[in-house]
Each structure stands twice: as C-alpha cells, then as structure tokens.
Image (tube, rainbow, N blue to C red):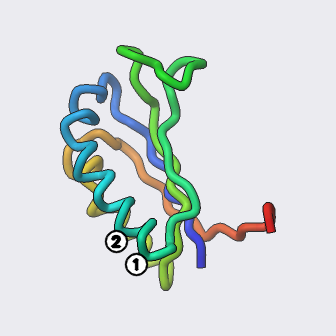
Amino acid sequence: MWYAIMAEDTPNSLDKRLVARPEHLKRLQILQEAGKLLLAGPFPAIDSSDPGPAGFTGSLIVAEFSNLQEATEWANNDPFVISNVYKNVIVKPFRKTLPS
C-alpha cells in the first residue's frame, strides 16, 4: 500500500538539511530503484522552486510499504529526522486514484 509521509521542518533548518541531504536522497533512491517511490520533494518556504536562503518548511514522500508500521519505522529513521531537520512527521495510508 502507498503511504504519505508528511514532515514539517524545524525553524532555520536549511544548514542541517544541506548536510543530511545526500544520505536522505540515498534512501529515496533505494525506494525508487525498487519501484516503491511515487513522489518525493520539499515544500519551499517561499513561492519559488529555488527558495535560496529562505529554505524549506517540510517535505512530502509518497512510497509503498508493506504496512503502516514499516512506513513509520522507515520515516523515523530518515537522516532528516536524526539530524533534527524535521520537527514533526506524520505517516498516513494513501490511496492513489489519479493518474491511473
């Protein structure tokens, strides 16, 4: 089943985010290579695809896992969680409807 992982950044997390990003992306690439990643990306803090020093306010990942516990454990072991980039993470089941 698909799961939405919605994360909110701590204030002024850009420097921490940049340091932890390579390891964060490695985990996402593993999901992608396994065909289990629907989408992933950050929420820019301003209305721009490149927010520069304004940074980001959080992230959204939609990925396939066996169950909610597995999705939650995966999310809680993310380098952004470990590095205190994320202050809050919510994991919910997600039903993909479109595109079909």
Residue 22 position, x and y percent, is 24, 46
SS type, badge 2: helix
Quarter of the image for the N terminus: give it.
bottom right
| Vertical comparison of 63 with 47: above or below | below
- Residue at left 40%, top 78%? 70
Mark 1 in CB contact with mark 2 (< 8 angstroms): yes
- Kind of residue at disc 1: Glu
- Kind of residue at disc 2: Glu
- The residue where tag 2 is placed is 73
- Give the CA separation, mark 1 to mark 2: 5 Å
Residue 66 position, x and y percent, is 49, 85
Residue 39 position, x and y percent, is 56, 55
Q: Nearer the viewer, residue 34 or 18?
A: 34
| Vertical comparison of 63 with 57: above or below | below
- The residue where tag 1 is placed is 70
- Residue at left 28%, top 47%? 80
Residue 35 position, x and y percent, is 50, 74
SS type, badge 1: helix
For label 1, count other residues whose C-alpha is less than 10 Å away and answer few (under 14), some (14-19) or many (20+). few
